[in-house]
Amino acid sequence: MRKSIDNKNITVLVGISGGVDSAVCALKLKQAGYQVVGAMMKVYDGDIKTIANSCYGTDKNKEIEDAKKICSKIGIDFHLIDCAEAFDKYVFKKFKEEYKCGRTPNPCVLCNPLIKFDMFPYLARKSGIEFDKFATGHYARIEYSKKLDKFLLKQGINQKKDQSYFLYKLSQEKLKNILFPLGELEKGEVRFFAKENGLIVHDKTDSQDFYKGNYAEIIDAKENQGNIRHINGKILGIHNGIFNYTIGQRKGLKIAHEYPLYVIKFDLNKNEVIVGEKEYTYSKGLFANDICWTFYDDIPDKLHASAKIRSAGQKTECCIYREENGLRVEFFESQNAITPGQAVVFYDNDTVLGGGTIKYAL
């Protein structure tokens, strides 16, 4: 990122998490001549089990201290913005509701448009912080197309760390005021830059998981036992709550069988987990609702694109058909473990078109 005389008149609020990515994001912007302010989201009250490790690590106090040290080293102000009430209302409660219904939500997809890129900067401004742009350490890119008069959300150069999947709900209005300084970098470059510049978090482990532990406790649900049934009808065992399982799961079923078995679907009416062999996990398509278009105002009745059904998955070609209550997506190749509650995100090469929430596999 080159230093520019024009940048000195632009103040950027950087979301500081206490990790290496946000630290490098802030320092890169400072070196590019921007006026930089650091701020950290406080997204929980009380028990650490109720928060996303992607927002904090496992020790909340250490993360805050690391964030303060990062800002001090860079020479920028540090603020702690209380987003706990909004996070609980719009992310955590939704997360719990989805799990209770046998769906597997993605907390980052829920959090980004509502909290990190909306409520967080809003509350920062309300607290008296003045800024022009908002930046985070996401591995994604934003480009402006004069021809289309649109801001394009693109995948990060680092395909293994690309986080565009989590950002498809960002609108044109939001994209025009967002900066992603790490979009052109590889992870190794980020760590090397942090070490060269004396940032204490240069070798800090990335936080990835939303939660590890007893889901009955975290989602306020009672362990409700039911049958684990083979797709052919045979009862193979007992489960302790549908919310403890996800589509495609193999480990932890605790049932004996001649061949490896995977979770295929749930029968909520009968409180049963349905399992089957590997071939039963594949589907040719899905139906999605809660559609958001990053690129389009609307789409034609049929659209050829590529799609990802999980953040770490590969893009695959598909045809998208507009239907009354959502989209029908048909893949050119069958996909494994299409999971209700997860996001399906559509791309044109490396440009994000939009996405939606998977309702069911076809």
Image (tube, rainbow, N blue to C red):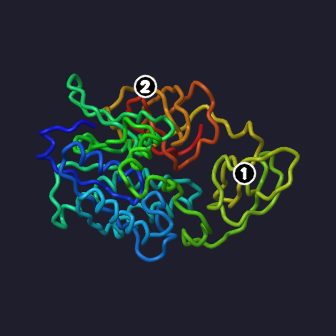
- Does residue 250 appear to the left or right of 40 in the view shown? right
Q: Nearer the viewer, residue 89 or 107?
A: 107
Q: Which residue is mark 2?
A: 349
Q: Which residue is found at the position 32% from the left and 42% from the top?
A: 181
Q: Callout 2: 10 Å neighbours few (<14), some, many (20+)? A: few
Corner quadrant of residue 278: top right
Q: Nearer the viewer, residue 6 or 83?
A: 6
Which quadrant would the C terminus be assigned to in this image? top right
Q: Which residue is mark 1?
A: 274
x and y percentages locating residue 135 in the rendered image: 28, 49
Which quadrant would the N terminus be assigned to in this image? top left
x and y percentages locating residue 2 in the rendered image: 24, 36
Mark 2 or 1, nearer chain start:
1
Whether residue 325 is visible to the viewer of this picture, yes or no, is no
Element carrying mark 2: loop
- Does residue 150 appear to the left or right of 53 in the view shown? left
